[in-house]
């Protein structure tokens, strides 16, 4: 990817975002791949059929190769369009990641609410059992 970017200037905004260095942590690598797929897809006008996670894990080499072929084909995009396509691809990934984060936070909040409800119900059951036990004791003392 860096070689194509350096020789054609295609995807340079993506390369520059990482100062020309391959991302080192897992999250950044995944983001890099998602942005690359989005940029190439945007330039092609159709979604490139590749799963960035499987691509990084080496599980779908034929699809990874198809992505690289698509990258090479789209490298002939006029330079005037490079920045806008890259920015558009990055925006799409940012929106997707933000939506995924929001969905994750909503799921966490739902789990917290469910746990709070469960605790409240448990406490109500305990209180009822204590009340019943107290009534039994009072009846036993009255008899």
Image (cartoon, rainbow, N blue to C red):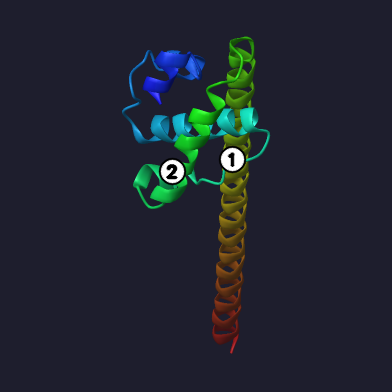
Q: Secondary structure at mark 1?
A: helix
Figure check: 58 above or below 5: below
Residue 95 left/right relative to 22: right
Closer to the camera: disc 1 or disc 2?
Answer: 2
Residue at image point 55% right, 83% down: 141
Residue at numbered disc 2: 64
Mark found first going from the N terminus, 1 or 2: 2
| Number of on-image labels | 2
**Left-right relation of 23 to 86:** left
48 or 70, which lies in front?
A: 70
Q: CA distance from mark 1 to mark 2?
A: 24 Å
70 or 117, which is in the foreground?
70
Vertical position of residue 60 compared to residue 43: above or below: below
Q: Position of residue 3 (x, y in %)?
A: 37, 21
Q: Please provide percent x and percent y for residue 33.
A: 46, 34
Q: Can residue 26 be spotted in the picture? A: yes
Q: Residue at x 64, y 22 (%)?
A: 88
On-image quarter of the N terminus? top left
Residue 134 falls left or right of residue 54: right
For label 2, the SS is: helix
Where 127 sits versus 71, above or below? below
């Amino acid at each position: 990817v860096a070689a194509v970017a350096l020789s054609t200037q295609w995807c340079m905004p993506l390369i520059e975002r990482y100062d020309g260095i391959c991302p080192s942590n897992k999250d950044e690598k995944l983001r890099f791949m998602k942005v690359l797929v989005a940029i190439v897809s945007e330039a092609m006008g159709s979604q490139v059929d590749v799963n960035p996670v499987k691509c990084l894990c080496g599980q779908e080499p034929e699809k990874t190769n198809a992505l690289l072929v698509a990258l090479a084909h789209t490298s002939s995009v006029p330079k005037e369009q490079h920045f806008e396509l890259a920015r558009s691809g990055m925006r799409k990934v940012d929106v997707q990641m933000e939506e995924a984060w929001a969905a994750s936070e909503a799921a966490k909040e739902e789990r917290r609410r469910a746990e709070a409800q469960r605790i409240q119900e448990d406490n109500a059951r305990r209180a009822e059992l204590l009340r019943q036990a107290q009534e039994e004791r009072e009846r036993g003392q009255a008899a």
